[in-house]
Image (spheres, helix red, strand yellow):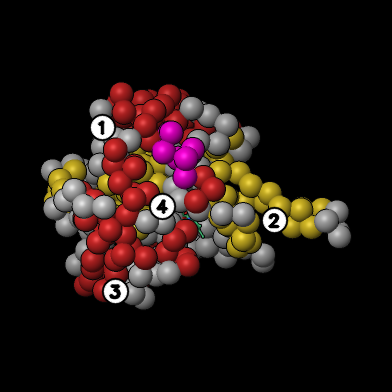
């Protein structure tokens, strides 16, 4: 049992956004983890990107899913009631293209969930498509506006792509965020050498990014706020390293795509380590 934001979680192993949908398929796994970060929700429905959407790379994958989701209205109508029945801790991952979109999504969902994880790795369409998360001022503005619309915990999911997550994280905490999660995927590209053009451009995840993710989490220690460590965690030992680096909990991403039951194994392995075993 751990406590973050004055809320109890049965263990520190969470599931990262985008790899487990809304947790409705493997309910026993959703019920066993500390919390689930849902797939990203936008204001309007999105079809996502054309294939290929996932490509295997050395020690990782590149994904270009493109935030496929039913939009917040449909989420509230048909998915939220089913998630609530599972009775687990759920953070809705929120994605927007303007500051106001983030606020509208949070307001629509209200206090029906454990909290929100703001995915700020989205382009600000009003600022020429710069990622919100690459700019401390833009990231903080989202938090300020969302803070006024909810009393639930707000976690900001930081990017480490061409920016310093410590600077952006500090700005978000100063603006009223309760915690931070990191890292989101890193930029990645694979070439089709026959066609001599990119085969896939997208987000790199998996063990390839783990040491960098760990470094970023460690870097955030000085903020002294709850941090959820994410990036290439495949085993309890990996998770333990993130806790040693200062994370309060971890979230499992790519490992779940390979094995939906991986979180159950990681919970056991981590528990053994925390009790002093090997
Ligand atoms: C297929 C896929 C979809 C993802 N979708 C989202 C998303 O909707 N919102 C988000 O904040 N992160 C999303 N992520 C990023 C993950 O939550 C996680 O931060 C990242 O993959 C690093 O963790 P990992 O190496 O354990 O996968 C996605 C990752 C993958 C692989």
Q: Which mark is residue 233?
A: 4
Give the mark nearer the N terminus: 4 vs 3: 3
Q: Which mark is residue 225?
A: 1
Q: Which mark is residue 269?
A: none
Residue denoted by label 2? 200
Label 2 within 8 A of ligand 1 by Cβ: no
Residue drawn at 35 percent across, 70 percent down: 261
Residue 78 placement: quadrant: bottom left
Q: From the viewer's perspective, is residue 53 above or below residue 118?
A: below
Circle 1 — which element? Answer: loop
Query: What is the crowding at mark 1: few (fewer than 14 residues within 10 Å), some, or many (at least 20)?
Result: many
Give the mark nearer the N terminus: 1 vs 3: 3
Q: From the viewer's perspective, is residue 273 above or below residue 137?
A: below
Circle 2 — which element? Answer: strand
Q: Does 46 sit left or right of 87 as displayed?
A: right
Front-most of 178 and 260?
A: 260
Residue denoted by label 3? 27
Give the mark nearer the N terminus: 1 vs 4: 1
Q: CA distance from mark 4 to mark 3?
A: 21 Å
Circle 3 — which element? Answer: helix
Residue drawn at 46 percent across, 51 percent down: 232
Residue 87 placement: quadrant: bottom left
The span shown in magenta is 210-216
Residue 84 image position (x, y, % from top left) = 23, 68
């Amino acid at each position: 049992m751990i406590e973050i934001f004055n809320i109890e979680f049965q263990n520190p192993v969470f599931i990262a956004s985008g790899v487990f949908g809304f947790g409705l398929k493997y309910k026993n796994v959703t019920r066993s983890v500390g919390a689930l970060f849902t797939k990203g929700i936008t204001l309007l429905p999105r079809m996502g990107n054309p294939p290929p959407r996932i490509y295997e790379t050395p020690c990782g994958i590149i994904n270009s899913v493109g935030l496929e989701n039913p939009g917040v209205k449909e989420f509230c109508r048909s998915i939220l009631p089913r998630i609530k029945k599972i009775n687990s801790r759920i953070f809705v991952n929120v994605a927007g293209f303007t500051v106001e979109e983030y606020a509208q999504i949070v307001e629509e969902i209200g206090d029906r969930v454990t909290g929100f994880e703001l995915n700020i790795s989205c382009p600000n369409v009003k600022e020429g498509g710069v990622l919100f998360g690459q700019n401390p001022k833009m990231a903080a503005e989202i938090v300020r506006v969302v803070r006024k619309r909810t009393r639930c915990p707000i976690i900001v999911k930081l990017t480490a792509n061409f920016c310093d997550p410590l600077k952006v994280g500090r700005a978000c905490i100063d603006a009223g965020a309760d915690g931070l999660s990191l890292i989101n995927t890193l930029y990645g590209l694979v070439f089709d050498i026959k066609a001599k053009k990119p085969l896939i451009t997208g987000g790199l995840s998996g063990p390839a990014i783990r040491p960098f993710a760990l470094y970023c989490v460690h870097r955030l220690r000085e903020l002294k706020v709850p941090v959820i460590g994410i990036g290439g965690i495949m085993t309890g030992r990996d998770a333990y390293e993130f806790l040693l680096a200062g994370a309060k909990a971890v979230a499992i991403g790519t490992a779940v795509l390979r094995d939906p039951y991986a979180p159950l194994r990681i919970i056991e392995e981590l528990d053994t380590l925390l009790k002093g075993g090997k």
